[in-house]
Image: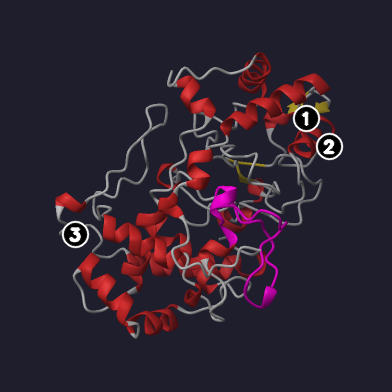
Amino acid sequence: MKITIHTLLRLTIFVVSVSILFFSGCNSKSSVDPSKEFSLEVPSNFPAPVFTFSDTPITEEGFELGRLLFYEPRLSSTGAIACGTCHRQTFAFADHGHDVSHGVHDRLGSRNAPAIQNMAFQPEFFWDGGVNHIELIPLNAIQNTQEMDESLANILTKLNNNPTYKQKFKEVFNTDSITSQLVFRAMAQFTGMLISSNSRYDHYVRGENNVQLTDTEKAGLQLFQQKCATCHATDLFTDHSYRNNGLDETPADHGRELITNNVSDRGKFKVPSLRNVERTSPYMHDGRFTTLEEVLNHYTSGVKRSATLDAALISGDAVGIPLTATEQNNLIAFLRTLTDNTFVTDKRFIDPLGTSNQN
């Protein structure tokens, strides 16, 4: 779920307007049966979550409703595209195989859909940080003409005319009327629980199950801490900042600048988490690299100078991160320890409808 360039400014203004209406009255706590609550478990090697769902506790029924909506193609104008179309579990809910994502009528967006994982720990979302609340994440994809191309009014008509959804919203929110606020709250209960924290690396740093890293992987970890952890910080493997990593001398996609209207943000994009990076290709905001080797080759010899190039990539007259072939091999070995096979096969997260496009 991303924001394409030609609609981003319009959508940003719209999101600000909607958020004012959407969150009015959101501070009151929902009445929830405590016995049905799901707890948001924070892994011991993670920082504290940004979103705790204290106002709208996650319940089993709410989670299941959110899962249905995430995979529901009727949220698009054609009834063929769901959130799960571009965010597939096998690939850590990234859009594997497409440089930029495909929407209704096979329309092409301008960015690659980022992975959906550990969303409750992120202060902002999308490549440019255009949304800062987990409940508003689906809004842009739904209304974007290159993605799902649907209106909230039409979605609410569809859902309110569907007896199954009427009953499920009644069970979760004790209401006879389905509103956009409740739709997004239900979806957030699902996306908020998409926590990836059971890779080999996690077991290693937490001292679990006697998991050890190989000498090559340990060498890669040490190198990563020396040369990569400035941006890919903490065990979330991102510092949530926006940086120009030297993809182009003159960035065609202005990135964060489109949100802040600050020329110093031109060509800056959110530092992505490296969790499950082995599975989330293609890489970068426009999906220009298909392998980890290509990514490291970029940092070694492909970084382009520009006015906003990140300072971490500049050393005197040189740019980039010098890496030998052996160092690149060690880094990739370490990055593969971040693959969470439990997460990408967890039956709680699978498509219950069996209708989302998996191509």
Earlier residue among tags 3 and 2 = 3
- Residue in view at x 53 percent, y 79 percent: 79
Q: Which of the numbered marks, if any, corresponds to residue 30?
A: 3
Image location (x, y in percent) of residue 208: 42, 21
Residue underneath mark 2: 302
Q: Is residue 164 left or right of residue 100?
A: left
- Residue in view at x 43 percent, y 77 percent: 152
Q: CA distance from mark 1 to mark 2?
A: 7 Å
Label 3 SS: loop
Q: Could you tell me if residue 287 is visible in this image?
A: yes
Asked whether the residues under the numbered discs 1 and 2 touch, taking CB atoms below 8 Å apart as contact, a structural biologist would say yes
Q: Name the residue type under label 2.
A: Gly
**In this picture, which residue range is highlighted in magenta?**
86-114
Earlier residue among tags 1 and 3 = 3
Q: Is residue 128 left or right of residue 51?
A: right
Task: Let me know if residue 95 is in the magenta part.
Answer: yes
Pointer 3 local density, CA inside 10 Å: few below 14, some 14–19, many at least 20 = few
Which label lies toward us, 1 or 3? 3
Label 2 SS: helix
Q: CA distance from mark 3 to mark 2?
A: 52 Å
Asked whether the residues under the numbered discs 3 and 2 touch, taking CB atoms below 8 Å apart as contact, a structural biologist would say no
Q: Name the residue type under label 1.
A: Gly
- Residue in view at x 44 percent, y 45 percent: 123
